[in-house]
Image: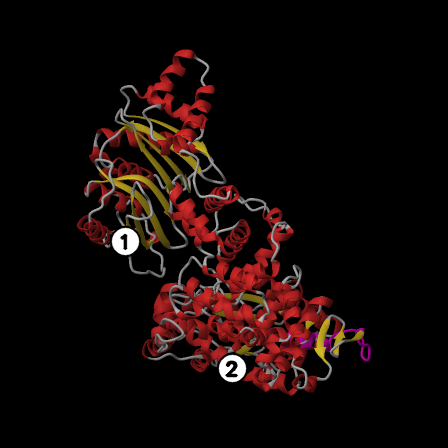
Amino acid sequence: MHLRPQLSRKLKDLRETFRQMCREDVPGVLAARTYAHQFHESLRKAFPETVVPEDGWGLLAVGGFGRGELGFASDIDLLLLYRNRLVKSHETLFKELVYCLWDSGFEVGHATASLSSMKRMAQDDFTVLTNILEARLIAGDPKLFSEWRESFFNGFGRQSRKKFLHNLVAYREERQQQYGGSSYLQEPHVKEGVGAMRDVHILRWAGHVFLRDPSFAAMVRKELMTNQEKLWLEQAYDFLWRVRLQLHRLTGRRQDQLLFMEQEQIAERFGCMAGQQGSAVEVFMRLYYRHTSRIRRTASFFLERVGETQKGFPGLRPRRRILPGPFLLEGKHLNFMEPEWIKKDLRLLMRFFWQAALCDAHFHHQAGQIIRENLAVFTDEARRDPEVVKQFFDILLDSEHAFSVVNVMLETGFLEVFIPEFAAVRYRVQNDVYHLYTVDEHLLRTVWQMHQMERGDDEVAGELNPSDIFVHVKSRRVLYLAALVHDIGKGDGRNHAARGGAMAGPIAERLGLDAHETGLLRFLVEHHLILAETALKRDLMDEKPIAQCAIQIKDRERLQMLYLLTIADSRATGPGAWSTWKASLVRELFVKVDRVLARGDLQGQDLEQRSGEVQENVLELVNDPAERERVRHWLERVSYRYLLSQAPTAIVEHHRMERALGNKPLAMASSPAEGEMWQLTVVTADRPGLFALITGVLWARGLNILSADIFTWESGVALDVLIVERLPDPLHPRELWERVEADLGRALEHRGYLDELLSNKRKPSILQQKNLPRKDDIVLVDEEASDFYTIIEVYTWDRPGVLHCITDTLYHLDVSIQLAKISTPGAQVADVFYVTDLSGNKLMDYEMHEKIRVSLLDSLTRVG
């Protein structure tokens, strides 16, 4: 038999009709089931009984197709099952069907197996087992299919059901770790992520094995799920299908990760609008997280309930203990014994969490429901109760259990009741790639990072030993509370640090902190960004920002706590927020501010005295008398900033590089720095636009610049010291630096060579285009932050060539760059330039400020 030619047209028409429906509307799971049913029927009708004998074979829909749910971009999973021997005509027909689907543009997963081989594969491979759990017959022998299904499910005896549950839980845990370990990732995976569609599939698989019925209604009847949980699952699953279908519509393919750009478009399709909860996309993502957190919790509780039905032997219960409350500890699970007592003594809610931490207990699935049912009666008086407050801090300061227990407080809604300010940041999205998690999840992870640091679990590159600093911290509970609430002000738009500082006062008052602790908490929350922002945006060789930090921080206790909070906050934000480079800058700032505070005054050591000491150290490194004399005269012509920012050994090397310059266009040296960073030193004759030229060559060679110190001497020689990263070929750096030096030499001799080198880089590449949230470009010009330089700050979104664009624009404005601090947190660029006019003076000209701002904003629109 040949499949009817119209089958291909029929299937393509079905798919296009469904795709068009998704363009015009926002359909959900019902539409996915309708499409799957229509697809199934079309295949079934292509195998009439009169042409294809039924006996001994079956064409099965498996996977999502077997479940009866398909998107228009979904795979079509098929299994040809046969009794003993595969008839050649059946095999040929199956291949013809697969080719027909391929030719029609469908992705097809297909396999052939005998009954016995399928049994072996299901026993050996858990993925195969779950794939056939929801198999449906498309065509073939109904009796064979029925007998196979009956035999398959009868094979699940008591021990095999236990094994299945064990494998199911392990599969879920492994998948959760693979997809980020949290349902609050900023770019979640709609199908495989934590609390996503796969968790619902897991419930159905368990329903097949333990109930012979995958419906939520059957789970409610067996008291494995509540009616409320059933409603949550139905609503959430439909929501995820709506999201997934729109995601496929927008991308034109089976993309299941919800990236930033698609989030904005889908939010608009869902009719989300900006309001008190934030932008439209933030409103949409809060709804997304609410649904996935409900799926995750319900799936966890369901599997726990199923596990209870499979424990031990009938009539044999785990060990039971009654704890003060009273609470029942059954095995490792803690539950309320007398839930009705809660309304009489509201302290029982916090005491329950406290006992869980004390006993290293898991929360019984019924406990969450009991807690949620009693949240409305929790009063302000209960929040202030000394016993409740003490137990809360006991939990928060417990290094082993703080994260897990406070996380359950958050999931059950109790944390929002105990600290009402938390409600505004629940599910709060931070719409950038700098932050990996939602605000509430980030705050909990900051606490977790703080405990890791105090225990000394991890060696953290570039940091002072945090565990050593903890020894000097007198107010641990204030530090950990600050970690928990430092971003509490993000519930209401901009200036979150200042607003959070104001909100910290009432929190401290309710929790019984004294005046000193309250002031400390408010300070830490309000100024938790000061160290990171100063380190990344200001010249740490300049005494002014160091002195300004010391004036704001006031004492060493605050500085030490602020340093620890900065590290924990950055590490909890995401991998793009903390690097060896940032760690080294924050450490340098901490040491310098600590030195000022330890002296007890803000008058720095005389510059001339300090530079004289450096000169003496440099001269001690030079053995040859003639060279020492040359170095002595040379040192008299360099700036204080140069002497105080460079190591004596580096200064000697720079002098020798200048001497070796001769008639060459440049002298260059490269050396490994911390982590994967490299230091690049370039000595050449000064000229306008030199730094723009260097940035262009380094961009062309694929390098990322982190910072640049730029010095010009009276002799007309320029020295640029750059820190770079992202070597294209880290295993062969020598070849790279040889190419960079050659390119710089040619570009210095012929400016047109740089344009030629960059011509290919300017062509946009599909591989470089990323769907990232883009904020408006900002250019700030500041004359106050430095006594000697005008500071230009540029905030834009990251794309290839942006640094070269900025520096080249400043060159054409006759602005001389003296120092550059480059920061790219996630997809956002924050570049800071210390500049002068061509005479070496501050700009001090408002019209020039405006010209710089307009020119930079205009040039940025033409990049990427």
Q: Nearer the viewer, residue 249 or 69?
A: 249
Q: Quadrant of residue 304?
A: bottom right
What x and y, as percent, mark residue 423? 49, 74
| Residue identified by numbered label 2 | 234
Nearer mark to the viewer, of 1 and 2: 1
| Residue identified by numbered label 1 | 779
Q: Secondary structure at mark 1?
A: strand
What x and y, as percent, mark residue 712? 29, 31
Q: Nearer the viewer, residue 401 or 615?
A: 615
Q: Is residue 857 left or right of residue 821?
A: left
Residue segment shown in magenta: 302-319
Q: Is residue 610 left or right of residue 250?
A: right
One can see residue 70 in this view: no
What x and y, as percent, mark residue 575? 48, 53
The residue carrying pointer 1 sits among few (fewer than 14), some (14 to 19) or many (20 or more) residues within 10 Å by Cα, namely many
Q: Of label 1 and label 2, which has the lower sequence position?
A: 2
The N terminus - image quarter: bottom left
Q: Is residue 38 magenta?
A: no
Q: Residue at x 59, y 85 (%)?
A: 377
